[in-house]
Amino acid sequence: MPVESAVTLLQVAIGGVLLGAVYALLACGLNLIFGVMRVINVAHGELMMLGSYTTFWLFFLLGINPLLSLLFSIPLMFLLGMGIQKFLVSRVVKAPELMSLLVTFGISMFILSLALYFWSADFRSVPYFTGSITLGSFAFSRPRVIAFGIAVVITLAVYIFLKKTKLGKAVRATSQSSEVAAICGVDVERIRLLTFGLGSALAAAAGSLLVVIYAVNPSTGQTFILKAFAIIVLGGMGSFLGAFIGALILGLAEAFTSFFFTAQLSEAVAYLLLILVLLFMPSGLLGERE
């Protein structure tokens, strides 16, 4: 293989990993909620979309740096997520999973309808970070590099929180068995409230980072939630680390498909991966085997 071809392929691979890390924020939040509550949160994409619009309007109206807008979008979606959990989702946590899917689908459609009413279907973006970063023979999109760095830091911080802190261990215990966790003194309802808020905050972070890479509109969340579902099935339902690995794999798959074929075809990769994993490896990479 010529050196130029090898360099090009490596650059494509790195570009896929850069985008995959942002996907990971969305998927890890979705998987965290499912792992603790066994709730399929269809509205997760709309929370991501609200994170994108929070960043857009703060930039457009007040000129706030998109990175600083994370300090607004993350707490805002954390509180909104807690509200959704407390007043709506908590009523169906112990019901069959289809019930939670229908409730969150209704929430999704409600948020989408409001967004279309107030903001129309126009695409919007935040052209704050432009150009590329050059390292030797490699050139990378500046927005993707910055988004990658922030996404990795946030994901790592949440992973350490889950592994090392007392509250994080309570979250993990609840995900393994809410009944046993309750017997051991864990306030399960409080943990569920925290988990839904944290998952929503991760969706907001993903949205705030994606709007500096892509143009978004109110329907964008629906596109990305489907990718997030493919990622968590690939990585393993309920596995935080599995979601991160699955996101990187999807980012790589999309990047190479776009390079060798077309960008339009790369959009179908997530669904192809979803079908293949369900057929041949239903538990995913790190999911529990029943």
Image: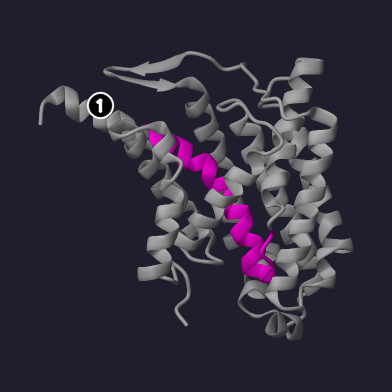
What amino acid is found at the position of numbered circle 1 in the picture?
Answer: Thr
Quarter of the image with the N terminus in it: top left
Q: Is residue 229 magenta?
A: no
Residue toward you, 44 or 146: 44
Q: Is residue 285 visible?
A: no
Query: In percent of the image, x 56 and y 55: which residue is there?
Result: 159
Which element is circle 1 on? helix
In the displayed structure image, the side of residue 52 where residue 285 appears, left or right: left
Location of residue 89 by image quarter: bottom right
The image's colour scheme reads one colour
Query: Which secondary structure type mostly characterizes the magenta part of the structure?
Result: helix
Residue 27 located within the stretch drawn in magenta: yes
Tell me where residue 244 appears, x and y as whole percent. 48, 52
Q: Is residue 19 left or right of residue 57?
A: left
Q: Is 196 drawn above or below residue 131 in the view shown?
A: below
Q: Residue at x 41, y 32 (%)?
A: 263
Q: Which residue is mark 1?
A: 8
| Spot occupied by residue 26 in the image (x, y as percentages of width and height) | 60, 47
Disc 1 crowd rating (10 Å Cα; few below 14, some 14-19, many 20+) is some
Left-right relation of 21 to 256 = right
Quarter of the figure with residue 253 = top left
Q: Is residue 285 left or right of residue 22?
A: left
Q: State the residue lying farthest toward the right.
A: 87
Where is residue 207? Give x, y as percent: 65, 37
Give the magenta range: 15-41
Residue 17, placed above or below residue 196: above
Furthest toward the left, the residue is 1
